[in-house]
């Protein structure tokens, strides 16, 4: 049964009807006539809202929709009064994209007041014309959480346009199951039990809490010469009939856009390639989403696809909490990823500004600095002879992604290679092979979207490229590795072996259904084995010649865990019980295994932190860094703690799901008789490896999240602000 409705869309100030404004019941779209009038039919209980596409020049806000709940007969006078903006039509404007705020009621987590503070800071720093929040606004989707979110967005004068995400319907979907219980079931891979819970609620919509507090979960509006569509794509939160209505609305909305209007589509989850293909018939220029708590930007068929980290805490890929600021012009756009810097943090260092070397007065001299075109995040620079190779991960558009080569003696740029998307981790290098490769060094880099590059290090000439299976939907945060005449590249979804000379695929082994959440723990070579850390699963050892699994060890490791270390036939890695979540407060387990067989030597909760971010081994000592800003030295045989060292407060918030902490994200680097420790406080510490005493401390003024690389007489280190430093031993 349907009931007819009719009404008018008018200017709130003048009372004049607005012609040509789209009005929808969430399924069909009509336009107002010359007097601003429209007529529609709605299905009670099915079409739960009537809403308008707010035209350019008017303020988007709550007045754009009406709830149909309780309507049982035809409705007259379903009118919409739209508030005209004081500046009228806009040809250029800016928009901030935020996502995954995960507001909860628990003390010590992201409450409404925390979100309010972050939104006010964003508003002060960026002065956007509007803010779009693309889902997972709350952690469990309770009415109380949603009301806290609503109160928070009313604390800023900038319009905040919310959209439904799966977490905003979890309470309705999972009933009495708690967040921790759901996490435990997933970690134990008890998917049948989860499906049993879901089956009990099959056919129900799980968006009703959201709708009660925030209105329609999907809608559109215009600003300038651009059309914005907010389209939540977690379809398992909608019954089949609502999914069909939602999809019908999307294509009806897009088909009515004029050919000269650019379109921006907001989703919550990453778009599939078939969905992007379906958008090609429209003038979609930008697709933005959250969900993965990470940053990724790629282009397909003229559409830019961009994921944003969370606003209120560090991303799972350790990108700082923040937002994307998009600048729109009439025909084009550009954007940058903007971290929310702690108010007390220093500003990035200028090129000609001196740094405070060696507070203790020992040992180091600054040889040169080089400004990279983008900041250095987690990819450690790599030395190849007299060259330093730095991976470039630009999170903006247009972007400067690729690999830069810097001369170790002068700090001058030798060459730069552009890549399709960001290179999230270090390159792999091979020594010269005069017999078979004319004495030319090669390096391999893999982009986040899954394109593998092999480059001549002396010239920057690209030898070959190959796309890994699943490109460009891959999320590759690991480095490739080179052994012999083969380069290995991939991630959780699968890894392949490629001929170093030609790029021919020798084998490819599928592992999981997708890359899952981002993980920087790159593969390791141990003899004839390729050892992988597969998050939420454990360790796999593949035969390097065939790609077949030789052994597997379930360890319950998570995505932020450190790259395993191989030393003298032993394999050292972070460990954990499958039911534990990595952001819990339990002591972290470390495991020592036989690299050849996977047999566990010991596996104990010996690390007084939540998980290791970096590992190193020498002389029967195990060194570990942690997201709590501590470095530890443990006895490799017993796991006994020998010493610990603490860094200072972080300058920006990079730690996954955390804020206002101290952290070390870079692994420790053994440097002679010392240990190099890089902190989120912007300092590089030289520690006595035996005692943990600080030999020297150098403040770079910007977080250091990537390990330094050693040179002949010193080391090279890069900071988040893009400055690369080369230090050598002082002659004094």
Image (cartoon, helix red, strand yellow):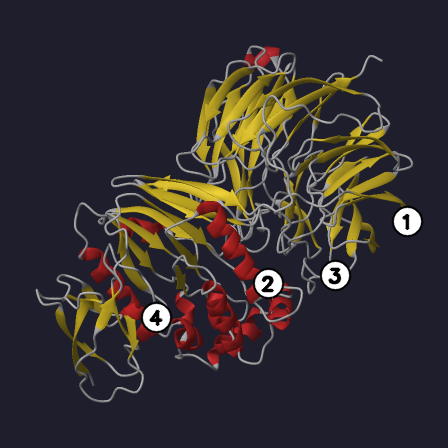
Task: Give the number of the disc on residue 585.
Answer: 3
Q: Of the residues under marks 1 and 3, which one precedes in the sequence?
A: 3
Q: Is residue 206 visible?
A: no
* Residue 193 horizontal/vertical position (percent): 57, 75
Task: Give the number of the disc on residue 216.
Answer: 4
Q: Of the residues under marks 2 and 3, which one precedes in the sequence?
A: 2
Q: Of the residues under marks 1 and 4, which one precedes in the sequence?
A: 4
How many other residues sit within 10 Å of disc 4, few (<14), some (14-19) or many (≥20)? many
Instruction: Give the position of the N terminus as an image quadrant.
Output: bottom left
How far apart marks 2 and 1 lie (CA) works out to 36 Å
Task: Identify residue for label 2.
Answer: 110
Q: Nearer the observer, disc 2 or disc 1? A: 2
Q: Total number of numbered labels?
A: 4
Q: Nearer the observer, disc 2 or disc 4? A: 2
Q: Secondary structure at mark 2?
A: loop
Q: Is residue 193 left or right of residue 671?
A: left
**345 up-or-down from 656: above or below:** above
């Amino acid at each position: 049964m349907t009931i007819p409705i009719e009404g008018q869309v008018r200017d709130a100030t003048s009372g004049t009807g607005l012609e040509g404004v789209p009005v929808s019941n969430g399924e069909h779209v009509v336009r107002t006539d010359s007097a601003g009038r429209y007529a529609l039919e709605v299905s009670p209980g099915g079409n739960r809202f009537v809403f308008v596409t707010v035209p350019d020049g008017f303020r988007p806000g709550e007045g754009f929709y009406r709830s149909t709940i309780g309507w049982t007969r035809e409705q007259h006078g379903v009118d919409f009064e739209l508030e005209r903006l004081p500046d009228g039509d806009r040809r250029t404007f800016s928009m901030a994209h935020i996502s995954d705020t995960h507001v909860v009621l628990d003390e010590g987590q992201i409450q409404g007041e925390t979100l309010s503070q972050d939104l006010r800071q964003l508003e002060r720093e960026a002065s956007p014309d509007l803010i779009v929040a693309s889902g997972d606004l709350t952690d469990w989707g309770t009415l109380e959480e949603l009301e806290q979110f609503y109160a928070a967005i009313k604390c800023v004068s900038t319009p905040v346009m919310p959209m439904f995400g799966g977490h905003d319907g979890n309470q309705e979907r999972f009933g009495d199951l708690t967040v921790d219980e759901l996490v435990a079931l997933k970690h134990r891979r008890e998917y049948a039990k989860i499906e049993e819970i879901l089956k009990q609620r099959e056919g129900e919509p799980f968006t009703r809490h959201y709708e009660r507090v925030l209105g329609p979960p999907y809608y559109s509006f215009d600003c300038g010469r651009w059309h914005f569509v907010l389209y939540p794509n977690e379809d398992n939160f909608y019954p089949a009939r609502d999914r069909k209505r939602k999809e019908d609305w999307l294509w009806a909305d897009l088909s009515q856009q004029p050919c000269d209007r650019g379109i921006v589509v907001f989703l919550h989850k990453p778009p599939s390639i078939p969905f992007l293909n379906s958008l090609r018939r429209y003038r979609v220029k930008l697709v933005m989403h959250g969900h993965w708590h990470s940053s990724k930007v790629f282009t397909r068929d003229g559409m830019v696809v961009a994921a944003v980290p969370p606003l209120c805490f560090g991303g799972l890929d350790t990108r700082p909490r923040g937002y994307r600021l998009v600048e729109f012009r009439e025909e084009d756009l550009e954007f940058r990823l903007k971290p929310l810097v702690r108010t007390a943090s220093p500003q990035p260092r200028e090129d000609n500004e001196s740094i405070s070397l060696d507070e203790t007065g020992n040992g180091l001299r600054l040889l040169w600095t080089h400004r990279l075109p983008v900041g250095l995040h987690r990819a450690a620079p790599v030395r190849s002879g007299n060259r330093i190779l730095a991976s470039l991960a630009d999170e903006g558009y247009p972007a400067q992604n690729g690999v830069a080569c810097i001369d170790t003696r002068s700090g001058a740029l030798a060459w730069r290679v552009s890549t399709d998307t960001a290179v999230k981790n270090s390159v792999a290098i091979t020594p010269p092979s005069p017999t078979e490769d004319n004495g030319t060094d090669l390096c391999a880099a893999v982009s986040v979207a899954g394109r593998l590059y092999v480059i001549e290090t002396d010239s920057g000439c690209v030898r070959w490229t190959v796309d890994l299976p699943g490109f460009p939907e891959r999320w590759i945060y690991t480095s490739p590795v080179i052994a012999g005449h083969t380069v290995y590249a991939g991630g959780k979804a699968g890894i392949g072996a490629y001929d170093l000379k030609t790029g021919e695929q020798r084998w490819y082994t599928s592992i999981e259904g997708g890359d899952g959440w981002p993980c920087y723990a790159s593969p390791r070579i141990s003899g004839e084995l390729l050892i992988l850390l597969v998050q939420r699963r454990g360790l796999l050892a593949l035969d390097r010649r065939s790609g077949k699994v030789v052994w597997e060890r379930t360890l319950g490791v998570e995505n932020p865990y450190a790259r395993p270390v191989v030393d003298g036939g032993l394999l050292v890695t972070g460990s954990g019980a499958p039911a534990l979540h990595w952001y819990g407060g339990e002591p972290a387990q470390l495991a020592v295994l036989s690299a050849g067989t996977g047999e566990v030597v010991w596996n104990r909760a010996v690390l007084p932190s939540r998980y290791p971010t970096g590992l190193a081994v020498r002389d029967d000592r195990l060194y570990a860094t942690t997201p709590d800003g501590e470095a530890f030295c443990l006895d490799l045989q017993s796991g006994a703690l020998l010493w610990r060292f603490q860094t200072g407060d972080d300058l920006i918030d990079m730690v996954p799901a955390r804020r206002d902490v101290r952290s070390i994200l870079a692994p420790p680097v053994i440097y002679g008789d010392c240990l190099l420790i890089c902190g989120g406080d912007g300092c590089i510490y030289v520690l006595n490896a035996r005692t943990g005493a600080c030999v020297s401390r150098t403040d770079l003024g910007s977080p250091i999240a990537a390990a330094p690389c050693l040179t002949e007489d010193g080391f090279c280190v890069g900071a988040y602000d893009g400055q690369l430093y080369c230090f050598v031993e002082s002659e004094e």
